[in-house]
């Protein structure tokens, strides 16, 4: 079956521009995660959804970052007034449940470059 | 702040060499350890999920061991091939948290 897909794969934005990153999880997966990977580092947790409910947004770095999953499937991560420090790879992952042995399946990421 | 460390940061080996790298993590409140392999321009691919002290998992030429008492895991690749070139990430799950805490990864380059 289809895996997690993300779009766009690459995005170049001018500083101050708003961007929207899309994630299509595996069908039927209840849990959805967003991670941010800065250059040379491992992915860092941003936010978590269980169906349409955003249960944890503790990793969002500022109030310029906003995520939604209105119908419990597709999710969008929006970054307002982008800054250069927002340049990173944004990864989306989904899992069937939230058990601690549950595998999170990742998309290929969106590479964002803010000039 | 949880500290997950992976070493070495990068590794260059010749085709056919066997290699191994380390993931260390806090041993308290440990629930599970996930290993991922991430090739450039592709999605991170799940390799193993490990939970029990002394656990050993194997997938083809890749194997992993887990020591939860001292807080480390080893990943071994036997007879490395160029297609093994990737970044290998470990991520423990601590407490009952659903989030993965990733290390910085080990970048492996296998020269033909």
Image (cartoon, coloured by chain):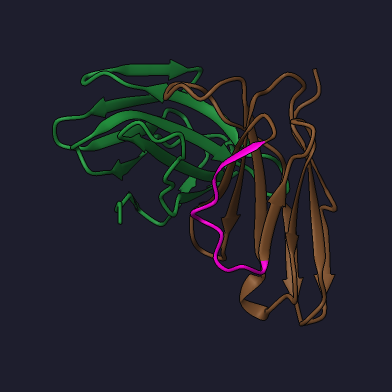
- Please determine whether, in this image, residue B99 is positioned above or below residue A73: below
Range of residues picked out in magenta: A53-64
Chain B tint as drawn: green
Snapshot quadrant of residue A93: top right
Give the quarter of the figure containing the N terminus of chain B.
bottom left
At x 67%, y 79%, the residue is A84
Which residue sits furthest left?
B69
Closer-to-camera residue (B79/A52) = A52
**Coordinates of residue A38 in the picture (x, y in percent):** 56, 64
**Coordinates of residue B107 in the picture (x, y in percent):** 50, 51
**Coordinates of residue B73 in the picture (x, y in percent):** 29, 34
Q: Main secondary structure of the magenta part?
A: loop
Closer-to-camera residue (B17/A94) = A94
At x 29%, y 53%, the residue is B3
At x 68%, y 79%, the residue is A83
Chain A tint as drawn: brown
């Amino acid at each position: 079956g289809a895996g997690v897909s993300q779009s766009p794969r690459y995005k170049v934005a001018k500083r101050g521009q708003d961007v929207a990153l899309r994630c299509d999880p595996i069908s039927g997966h209840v849990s959805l995660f967003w991670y941010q990977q800065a250059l040379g580092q491992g992915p860092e947790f941003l936010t978590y959804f269980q169906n349409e409910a955003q249960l944890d947004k503790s990793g969002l770095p500022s109030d310029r970052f906003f995520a939604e999953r209105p119908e419990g499937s597709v999710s969008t991560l929006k970054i307002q007034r982008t800054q250069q420090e927002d340049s990173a790879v944004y990864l989306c992952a989904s899992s069937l449940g939230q058990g601690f042995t549950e595998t999170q399946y990742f998309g290929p990421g969106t590479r964002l470059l803010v000039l | 702040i949880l500290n997950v460390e992976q070493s070495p940061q990068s590794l260059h080996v010749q085709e056919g060499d066997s290699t191994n790298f380390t993931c260390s993590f806090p041993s308290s409140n440990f629930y599970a350890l996930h290993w991922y392999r991430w090739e450039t321009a592709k999605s991170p691919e799940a390799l193993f999920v490990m939970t029990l002290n002394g656990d050993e998992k194997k997938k083809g030429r890749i194997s992993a061991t887990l020591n939860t008492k001292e807080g480390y895991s080893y990943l071994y690749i036997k007879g490395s091939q160029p297609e093994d070139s990737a970044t290998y990430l470990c991520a423990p799950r601590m407490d009952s948290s659903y989030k993965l805490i990733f290390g910085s990864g080990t970048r492996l380059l296998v020269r033909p």
